[in-house]
């Protein structure tokens, strides 16, 4: 075998210069994707993000969950929860505590809560709250 000093990047570049590359196929999505509208955030408490992260406890052979509500305007965590379970009831409790922390619990507001639509966030209990 003779080593000529060409790696795959150089071969690709040369083929591209010679116009001998095949057109790549265009992958079409199988379903229409819904892209969230980008909002211009000008004040606190207009857009919150919520997410669930989890980790593994090796000695106990189980997972723990961290849920946090984040205000997008000032990037501060409003409320968080660390526990061994993460149900819709837990999310509702954390949401109510977050609203109380910001003084919005009994007020009419234009607050939008953005999530990844996990099972806790699409539950009837969370939606009703």
Image (cartoon, rainbow, N blue to C red):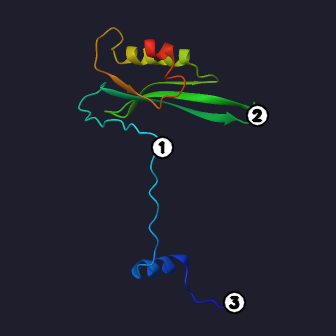
Label 2 neighbour load within 10 Å: few <14, some 14-19, many 20+: few
Q: Mark 2 = which residue?
A: 59
Q: Is residue 22 visible?
A: yes
Q: Is residue 95 above or below residue 24?
A: above
Circle nearer the viewer, 1 or 2 = 1
Q: Which residue is mark 1?
A: 30
Residue 30 versus residue 112: which sits nearer the camera?
Answer: 30
Left of 97 or right of it: where is 40?
A: left
For the residues labelled 3 and 1, the Cα–Cα distance comes to 45 Å
Q: Which mark sits nearer the N-terminus, 3 or 1?
A: 3
Does the CB distance between marks 3 and 2 fall below 8 Å? no
**Count of numbered circles in the view:** 3
Quadrant of the rendered image containing residue 38: top left
Q: In this orientation, which residue lies closer to the viewer: 5 or 95? A: 5
* Residue 106 pos. (x, y %): 33, 8
Residue at 75%, 32% in the rendered image: 61
Which numbered disc, 1 or 2, marks the residue that appears first in the sequence? 1
Q: CA distance from mark 3 to mark 2?
A: 53 Å
Q: CA distance from mark 1 to mark 2?
A: 43 Å
Identify residue for label 3. 1
The residue at the point 47 percent across, 60 percent down is 25
Q: Residues within 10 Å of mark 1 (few under 14, many from 20)?
A: few
User: In the visual, does 22 lie left or right of 109?
Assistant: right
Foreground: disc 3 or disc 2: 3
**Percent position (x, y) of residue 44?**
29, 27
């Amino acid at each position: 075998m003779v080593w000529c000093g060409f790696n795959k990047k150089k071969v690709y570049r040369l083929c591209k210069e010679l116009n001998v590359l095949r057109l790549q196929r265009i992958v079409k999505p199988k379903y229409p994707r819904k892209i969230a509208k980008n909002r211009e955030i000008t004040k606190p408490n207009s857009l919150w993000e919520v997410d669930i992260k989890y980790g593994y406890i090796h000695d106990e052979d189980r997972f723990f969950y961290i849920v946090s509500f984040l205000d997008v305007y000032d990037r501060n965590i409003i409320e968080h929860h660390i526990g061994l379970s993460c149900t819709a009831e837990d999310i509702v409790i954390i949401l109510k505590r977050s609203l109380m922390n910001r003084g919005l619990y009994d007020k009419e507001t234009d607050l939008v809560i953005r999530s990844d639509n996990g099972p806790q966030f699409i539950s009837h209990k969370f939606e009703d709250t």
